[in-house]
Image: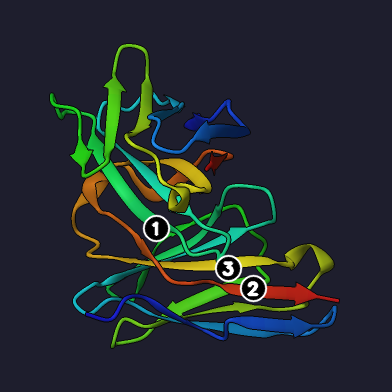
Amino acid sequence: DAGVTQSPTHLIKTRGQQVTLRCSPISGHKSVSWYQQVLGQGPQFIFQYYEKEERGRGNFPDRFSARQFPNYSSELNVNALLLGDSALYLCASSLGDRGREDTQYFGPGTRLTVL
Amino acid sequence: AQKITQTQPGMFVQEKEAVTLDCTYDTSDQSYGLFWYKQPSSGEMIFLIYQGSYDEQNATEGRYSLNFQKARKSANLVISASQLGDSAMYFCAMTLDSNYQLIWGAGTKLIIKP
């Protein structure tokens, strides 16, 4: 079975631009989560979607937004890019209905560089 | 506040030796899940093992086992018979029934020496 896929794998943008990252979950998974991982740190939670509804939001500015589509794929949008947005963006999928036992499986990530 | 602490920034271990990676957690919730993930230099986060707060037995998955000590709020990862391919960053993470996000530690960089 195919794992979580993300596109693009690498992206270079300049300050002030906008970016869209895409994620396709494992077949049968209804939840998608987004994390930001700055070099040398653990990931930070950005959003979680389940059944096309936002179920959680981390401490990120409104420049960050996301949505989930009827096929459960997801997009993360970041507007007005700042240098500090340079990071690895990880998407994870899970069944979404297992509470604390809901194991999240990750894609390869999108490495965003803001110049 | 919920928090994961990994106190070992880096570890060097001889190939074929066992290694223990430390993780302590802080939460007032009674219902939570603890996870370990491996992140090679390629960047992908790989799920290794899960332990639920109500599980009485320590979780095991192949060469990975989780030493769960609930009273001490620790969830250490034990890798038996380490291999060169085990060299990577290892992250401990937690979820709560009240909050579905993963809360992460800072990670431990493990290097296996031949």
Question: Toward which corner of the image does residue B62 lie, by quadrant?
Answer: top left
Q: Residues within 10 Å of mark 3 (few under 14, many from 20)?
A: many
Q: Residue furthest front?
A: B114
Q: Nearer the viewer, residue B26 or B12?
A: B12
- Residue at the image position 49 percent from the left and 55 percent from the top: B39
In this rendering, would B72 be left or right of B60?
right
Q: Name the spot of residue A43 as percent of width and height, x first.
A: 56, 52
Q: Residues within 10 Å of mark 1 (few under 14, many from 20)?
A: some
Marks 3 and 2: same chain? yes
**Residue labelled with disc 2:** A111
Amino acid at the residue labelled 2: Arg
Q: Are marks 3 and 2 in contact (CB under 8 Å)?
A: yes
Question: Toward which corner of the image does residue A115 lie, by quadrant?
Answer: bottom right
In this rendering, would A98 be left or right of A65?
left
Amino acid at the residue labelled 3: Tyr
Marks 1 and 3: same chain? no
Could one spot residue B41 in this view of the protein? yes
Q: Chain of mark 1?
A: B
Which dot marks residue B46?
1
Measured along the vertical axis of the image, is residue A50 above or below residue A25? Answer: above
